[in-house]
Each structure stands twice: as structure tokens, then as C-alpha cells.
């Protein structure tokens, strides 16, 4: 209902986003179901996903304005699943033949090299003019597949390639909790890890429910493997070379035999490794934007850190839900 109202609102309005009546949009958004999601600004249920309330206008702008090109690559993920790692890898793979004086990741946070559709590009279209971005364009998103594909893949002949990275939900919860504690400008930092488990299990968390997010991309990857590549954080940790080769092939720039024997794949993995990125000056001391330190994107970068923070009963509770939701899908992300 709210989507219809919003779509109607935009399609009858002036094409110039600056001329939109923000009050009308706000009143449309105020009709949406609301929850806290641990965020100071709250989350709203739109198209069956709990979006941070502040970005719903950006989602609507994206859905009305985005014109995909065949060469586009979108890195999609549920928050805290390895977005920073994958955008670094994709950026390095796609641009490996550029002659830089020094690799851009050495001096720039990955999220500034690969902007987010909903947090950057469509929050201020003048800041990141997508139409002037050189091809192949690389962007990121936390939008669920249904919201992304609604306009970007179904109604256009051009299809972006989507690389999705998933992660064990127990590690996602712990990572999210630490991130929220480190970002008091946006999150209620008094929340315990138990509060995060409860929010996660209710589905009422940024971009939740987690299971719908993951299953949306999982099913799309099975139905349209040429459009959606589904990756697991844990597989990348276990077999970086194999997974990097899969990614390169999927985005249409496979590593040549010569590159492989020259160690190009390993060099890219080293450049994008957790230890390397975390220790760079720009990521230790820089800011992504005011009140947002780059170091928040880098914590431990390990598989299975959840054992140090979740009680067995918390883990069992999450596992039960995930088992039920994933049943029959052929997907398994829990590792005990
Ligand atoms: P932890 O909190 O478990 O350490 P996102 O980028 O989606 O926000 O995910 C953040 C998680 O990915 C954090 O997990 C972070 O430390 C980890 N991470 C960031 N860069 C990484 C890299 N290059 N390699 C592996 N993990 C990385």
C-alpha cells in the first residue's frame, strides 16, 4: 500500500527530485509500520523489509531513477556479512589493469571507492552522479533482492550482475552488536548482545528479516546464475584464490593463465586482506563521514567469533529459527 502511494506520489510529481514536496513523502512514510531496530532513528517496514527509516526516500528514488547498464556490478549483502571485504576485492579485480601510481585502497576507504546505492548515491544524487561514473560501474547495496530487482532488473533490458555475500548469522549478530556499540551517534549503545539476538530473531533489525534477505538472493542465484552469484564469507576465508577466480569469471574478467602464474590473484587477496586494510592509516584514523570512523568497518575479521559472545541457548535459539526458515532451500550457513 505504502509503495503504491509512494510510487503514485513520485509519478505524478515533478521529475526534479529537489522539487518534491518532502512533507508529502514524509506523510507517506509515516504510514509504514515502525520499530526501533536498535537504531536511534528507527526502522520502517517497506516492501517486507525493515529499512532504516531515514533511507526510505533514497530507496524510492533508486527505484524510480536507476537505469542499469549491462556492465554494472552490484555487491549486495546483509549488513555485517563482509561487504567491505567484497567491495575491495571486486574493485581490485575489475580495475587490475589500471595503471595507478598507488593502489587506491591504500589511501581511500573501500566504501568511498564503491558507493552504496541507498546510503550515498540516492541520498544525494548530485554528490555521486551515477550516470557519469565510468563503466564498468561498481556499487553496493543492502537492499533485499525484491526491492533491488523490482526496478533494476525486471523492467529493463539491461541486467546488472549481482554478487551477494552471506555470512553465518551468529557472526553477523555479534558483528552488528559491536558495530552498534562503536557507533553511538546512530545506535543505542546500551543494547546487550541478548537484545541483538532478540531483534534478529524477531526480524526487526536493519534490512531484516535476515532469512528473507539471504533466501531472496539464494533463490535468484539458483534461478538466474548468470545474473546472481552467491558467496559465503566462510568460503572466502577458506579458499580465497578459488573464490576470487569465481568472482572474476562471473563479472566477465577471468584471470588469464599468465596472471595466475604471476601471482596476480594472491596479490589482490593480500591487498584486500583484513590485516592489510585494517592497518592502513586511512582506515585507522580516517572518517567515512562526520561521526563515522573508518575503523568501524574493521573489527576482528574472523569466522566463529560468536562463541566468545553468545551463550549456547542464544545460539540454539537462532539456529532453530534459521533451520526452520531455510528448510527445503538447500542452503546452510550455520557452522557450530
Ligand atoms: P567482525 O565484526 O566479525 O570482525 P561489513 O563490511 O558487511 O560491514 O562487515 C563487517 C565485518 O567484516 C566485520 O566482521 C569486519 O571486521 C569484517 N571485515 C572487514 N574487512 C574485512 C576483510 N578485508 N576481510 C575479512 N573480514 C573483513
Image (cartoon, rainbow, N blue to C red):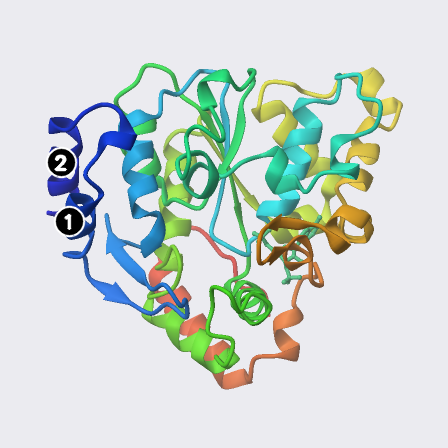
Task: From the viewer's side, name the closer residue of 131 and 221.
Answer: 131
- Report if residue 146 is visible in the image: no
- Residue 28 is labelled as 1
Q: CA distance from mark 2 to mark 1?
A: 9 Å
Task: Relative to 314, say whether 329 is above or below.
Answer: above
Left/right of residue 166 with respect to residue 296 in the rendered view: left
| Quadrant of residue 259 within the rendered picture | top right
At numbered mark 2, what does the secondary structure look like: helix, strand or loop? helix
Residue 5, how many percent across, how many down? 11, 42
Q: Where the C terminus falls, by quadrant?
A: bottom right
Q: Label 2, on which residue?
A: 9
Residue 271, how many percent across, how many down? 80, 39
Task: From the viewer's side, name the closer residue of 198 and 117.
Answer: 117
Mark 2 or mark 1: whose residue is earlier in sequence: 2
Left/right of residue 195 with respect to residue 90 in the rendered view: left
Residue for point 30% across, 34% down: 61
Task: Relative to 331, say whether 309 is above or below.
Answer: below
Please tell me how many numbered marks the rendered image carries.
Answer: 2
Residue for point 33% across, 33% down: 62
Residue 310, how many percent across, how many down? 56, 80
At numbered mark 1, what does the secondary structure look like: helix, strand or loop? helix
Residue 11, how many percent across, how many down? 15, 28
Badge 1: residue crowd in 10 Å (few <14, some 14–19, many ≥20): some
| For the residues bearing labels 2 and 1, Cβ distance under 8 angstroms | yes
Amino acid at each position: 500500500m505504502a509503495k503504491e502511494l509512494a510510487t503514485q506520489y513520485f509519478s505524478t510529481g515533478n521529475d526534479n527530485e529537489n522539487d518534491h514536496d518532502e512533507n508529502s513523502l514524509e506523510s507517506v512514510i509515516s504510514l509504514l509500520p515502525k520499530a526501533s531496530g536498535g537504531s536511534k532513528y528507527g526502522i520502517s517496514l517497506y516492501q517486507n523489509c525493515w529499512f532504516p527509516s531515514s533511507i526510505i526516500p533514497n530507496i524510492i528514488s533508486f527505484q524510480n531513477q536507476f537505469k542499469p547498464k549491462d556492465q554494472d556490478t552490484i555487491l549486495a549483502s546483509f549488513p555485517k556479512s563482509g561487504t567491505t571485504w567484497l567491495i575491495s576485492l571486486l574493485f581490485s579485480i575489475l580495475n587490475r589493469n589500471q595503471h595507478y601510481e598507488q593502489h587506491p585502497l591504500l589511501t581511500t576507504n573501500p566504501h568511498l571507492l564503491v558507493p552504496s546505492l541507498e546510503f550515498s548515491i540516492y541520498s544525494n544524487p548530485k554528490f555521486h552522479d551515477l550516470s557519469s561514473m565510468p563503466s564498468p560501474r561498481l556499487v553496493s547495496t543492502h537492499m533485499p533482492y525484491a526491492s533491488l530487482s523490482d526496478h533494476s532488473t525486471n523492467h529493463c533490458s539491461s541486467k546488472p550482475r549481482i554478487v551477494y555475500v552471506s555470512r553465518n548469522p551468529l557472526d553477523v549478530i555479534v558483528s552488528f552488536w559491536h558495530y552498534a556499540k562503536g557507533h553511538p551517534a546512530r545506535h543505542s549503545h546500551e543494547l546487550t548482545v541478548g537484545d541483538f539476538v532478540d531483534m534478529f530473531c524477531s526480524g526487526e533489525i536493519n534490512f531484516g528479516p535476515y532469512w528473507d534477505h539471504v533466501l531472496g538472493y539464494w533463490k535468484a542465484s539458483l534461478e538466474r546464475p548468470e545474473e546472481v552469484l552467491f558467496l559465503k564469507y566462510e568460503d572466502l576465508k577458506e579458499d580465497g584464490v578459488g573464490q576470487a577466480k569465481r568472482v572474476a569469471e562471473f563479472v566477465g574478467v577471468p584471470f588469464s593463465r599468465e596472471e595466475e602464474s604471476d601471482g596476480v590473484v594472491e596479490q589482490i587477496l593480500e591487498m584486500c586482506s583484513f590485516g592489510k586494510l585494517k592497518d592502513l592509516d586511512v582506515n585507522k584514523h580516517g572518517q567515512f563521514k562526520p561521526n563515522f570512523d573508518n575503523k568501524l568497518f574493521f573489527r576482528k575479521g574472523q569466522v566463529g567469533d560468536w562463541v566468545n559472545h553468545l551463550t549456547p541457548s542464544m545460539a540454539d535459539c537462532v539456529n532453530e529459527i534459521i533451520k526452520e526458515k531455510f528448510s527445503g532451500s538447500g542452503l546452510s550457513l550455520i557452522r557450530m
